[in-house]
Image: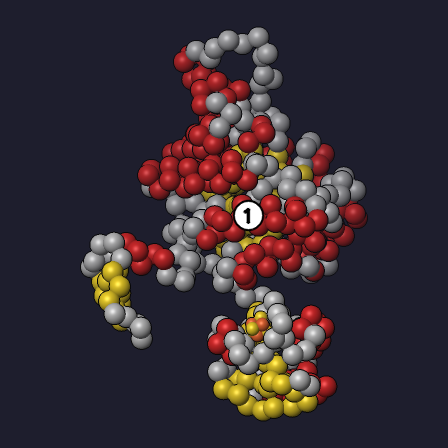
Amino acid sequence: MTATLPGSSTQVETSHSTLKVDSSLLRYGARIHRRPTRTVMVGNVPVGSNHPVAVQSMINEDTMDIPAAVAGIRRLADAGCEIVRVTTPSLSHARAMGHIRQQLRDAGCTVPLVADVHHNGVKIALAAAQHVDKVRINPGLFVFDKPDPDRQSFSPAEFSAAAARIRNALRPLVELLKEQNKALRIGVNHGSLAERMVFTHGDTPQGMAESAMEFIRICAEMDFHNVVVSMKASRTSVMLAAYRLVADAMDAEGFDYPLHLGVTEAGDGDYGRIKSTAGIATLLAEGLGDTVRVSLTEAPEREIPVGFSILQSLGLRKTMVEYVACPSCGRTLFNLEDVLKQVRAATAHLTGLDIAVMGCIVNGPGEMADADYGYVGKAAGTICLYRGREEIRVVPESEGVEALVALIKEDGRWVDP
Ligand code: SF4
């Protein structure tokens, strides 16, 4: 049988048929092709290009409470967080970063630090930049004019004057970051677009993208390229559109800056995780995104496993065992939920392995997705163990987990927890 897809420039042989595939459709392959970017170093962590997508978060301690801030940063670093952001709303907060950094380094914690700067933050950003690896500014607030509720229009002259003030404010920060080879995040938030952007483009993803591009162009004019861009919104659809727009706009103007992905104010619990995943994973699957932050209304260290799970589920990083398990059905020959828990408890530390737990041999072996090892129901009270696609041994169910561990040990792929 020959199946034909639209267009026909490439023939793909399969065991069932010959497919004629338009080469443009080859992007539907299983691998994610990341948007090419430059590498931006954030301290010792490379962001962008083919480097692993970095997982980051932000402490919620008061920056002025130095011991608490240091403890919060260390908790995040211990949880696997690769870049930590700290808020610096005043000059005192920016200066506190010097003590925080010193105490972290004294304790052997080298996680890169980012200072978060908001309203009229020029002086704060300059002070914070001395002590951190990256400064995050919000284009809507960096040069902040209180919105005028009676304003009916924004004249071109007013628009240009505001743009000139931004240029003047950004220049010393860019010069300092360039001199110290540090990074800048241009972090647009949907909820805090500048008034003139809202007048010109509306409260829209287009307004967000233009807001970022204005700052990006100034950095590029100054030959400063250690730039990371984010376009966060609490509505996933807005966030998706804004990231896609800014990626297209950057590509069109030849800017290859990495993207920091996140959905703001995603909330907590299952829904917060699902909402964050919907936004972050959708973009990652399209090849957009070089560092991620899952924002949860929970202890920040709880964000880290979610970030790593998103990356692992897309095949972008492998930081834990990949478990393949069937949902179970009428054919299931053992308590799948219990057995999966037991297998996980015994093997969760074996990063890099794929282990399948399947309820029966009717569909199990075929659906194990090329796992390294399989634990499959054979008959009532009996299971079989697979290495790849090969059945290796049959054992009583009561000895199944032990036998799986023994098989992994025999193969030299075991490490003690
Ligand atoms: S692998 Fe077997 S037990 Fe599991 S869902 Fe499929 S048919 Fe059911």
Three-letter residue code for mark 1: Ala
Residue at which label 1 appears = 278
Image coordinates for residue 290, horizontal then vertical, percent: 49, 51
Image height check: is 398 above or below 369?
A: below
Q: Is residue 224 visible?
A: no
Image height check: is 68 above or below 349?
A: above
Q: 337 or 233, which lies in front? A: 337
Q: Seen in the image, is 20 located left or right of residue 112?
A: left
Q: Secondary structure at mark 1?
A: helix
Image coordinates for residue 321, horizontal then vertical, percent: 60, 71
Image coordinates for residue 163, horizontal then vertical, percent: 45, 22
Identify which residue is drawn at 51% across, 38% down: 237
Identify which residue is drawn at 38% across, 52% down: 36
Identify which residue is drawn at 43% across, 52% down: 287
Image coordinates for residue 270, horizontal then vertical, percent: 67, 50
Identify which residue is drawn at 58% across, 22% down: 144
Q: Is residue 30 visible?
A: yes
State which quadrant residue 80 falls in: bottom right
Around disc 1, counting alpha carbons within 10 Å, would you say few (fewer than 14), some (14 to 19), or many (20 or more)? some
Query: How many numbered discs?
Result: 1
Residue furthest front in the image: 330
Ligand 1 closer than 8 Å to the CB at disc 1?
no
Image height check: is 215 above or below 134?
A: above
Image height check: is 54 above or below 330?
A: above
Q: Seen in the image, is 108 located left or right of residue 15?
A: right
**Quadrant in which ligand 1 is drawn:** bottom right
The quarter in which the N terminus is drawn is: bottom left
Q: 233 or 392, which lies in front? A: 392
Q: 350 or 144, which lies in front? A: 350
The quarter in which the C terminus is drawn is: bottom right
